[in-house]
Image (cartoon, helix red, strand yellow):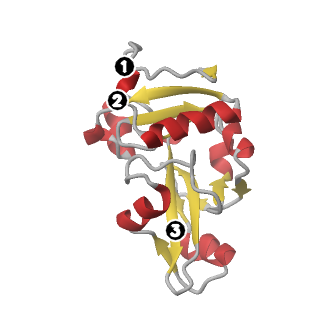
């Protein structure tokens, strides 16, 4: 992985043309370049973008894959937070997240609400390039990894990145944000 390297690579390492890069993917790359941490962009078949399918198809261990989930309060005014947890854990929505948000009920934001807030589709949602004002909480197990696989903003790209990126993005590391299944 190289800090600040822009060049989309396939899983076989051959460069892909940059002319198909979406606006959200460009924002993700800009966020990575701005953070100045080592990363590698990984092209993926959109049909295998969901974490479990991606790991199985391309041979990445789920313990290195992290999922970014937007959570919303149930009552108005709606409050939102983006949470990052390892694929091998479960986000504690009704415990830690609900209490930290200071709300009586919380749940996963719908796919439509997630897209409206982040500009990203499920299977590509990433902690990178989130809108200003959306809090970012990261489970402590994620930052303990040597590197993690994150969504790349679209279903066609993943990012292998140093967890140092979360500190650079101003994320809050939360002990116990996720539980073991």
- Image location (x, y in percent) of residue 64: 53, 37
Q: Is residue 60 left or right of residue 139?
A: left
Distance from label 1 to label 2 (Cα)? 7 Å
Distance from label 1 to label 3 (Cα)? 35 Å
Q: Is residue 181 visible?
A: no
Distance from label 2 to label 3 (Cα)? 30 Å
The reply to whether discs 1 and 3 touch (Cβ–Cβ < 8 Å) is no
Q: Is residue 94 above or below residue 70?
A: below
Label 1 sits on residue: 17
- Image location (x, y in percent) of residue 90: 50, 60
The reply to whether discs 1 and 2 touch (Cβ–Cβ < 8 Å) is yes
Badge 3 local density, few (<14 within 10 Å), some, or many (20+)? many
**Along the line of sight, which residue is nearer the eye, 85 or 40?**
40
The part of the image, by quadrant, that contains residue 139 is bottom right
Q: Is residue 10 above or below residue 140?
A: above
Residue that sits furthest to the top in the current view: 14
Q: Is residue 145 left or right of residue 117?
A: right
Label 3 sits on residue: 71
- Image location (x, y in percent) of residue 112: 36, 65
* Residue shown at the point (29%, 39%) measured from the top left: 46
Query: Which SS class for mark 2?
Result: helix
């Amino acid at each position: 992985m190289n800090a600040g390297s822009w060049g989309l690579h396939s899983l076989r390492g051959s460069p892909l043309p940059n002319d198909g890069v979406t606006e959200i993917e460009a924002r993700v790359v800009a966020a990575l370049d701005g953070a100045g941490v080592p990363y590698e962009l990984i092209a993926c078949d959109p049909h295998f973008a969901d974490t479990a399918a991606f790991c199985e198809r391309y041979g990445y261990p789920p313990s290195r894959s992290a999922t970014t989930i937007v959570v919303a309060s149930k009552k108005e005014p709606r409050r939102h937070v983006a949470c990052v947890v390892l694929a091998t854990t479960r986000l504690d929505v009704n415990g830690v997240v609900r209490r930290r948000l200071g709300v009586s009920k919380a749940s996963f934001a719908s796919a439509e609400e997630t897209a409206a807030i982040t500009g990203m589709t499920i299977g590509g949602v990433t902690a990178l390039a989130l809108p200003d004002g959306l809090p970012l909480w990261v489970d402590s197990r994620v930052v303990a990894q040597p590197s993690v696989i994150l969504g790349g903003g679209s279903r066609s790209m993943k990012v292998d990145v140093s967890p140092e990126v979360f500190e650079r993005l101003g994320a809050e590391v939360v002990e116990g944000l996720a539980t073991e299944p």
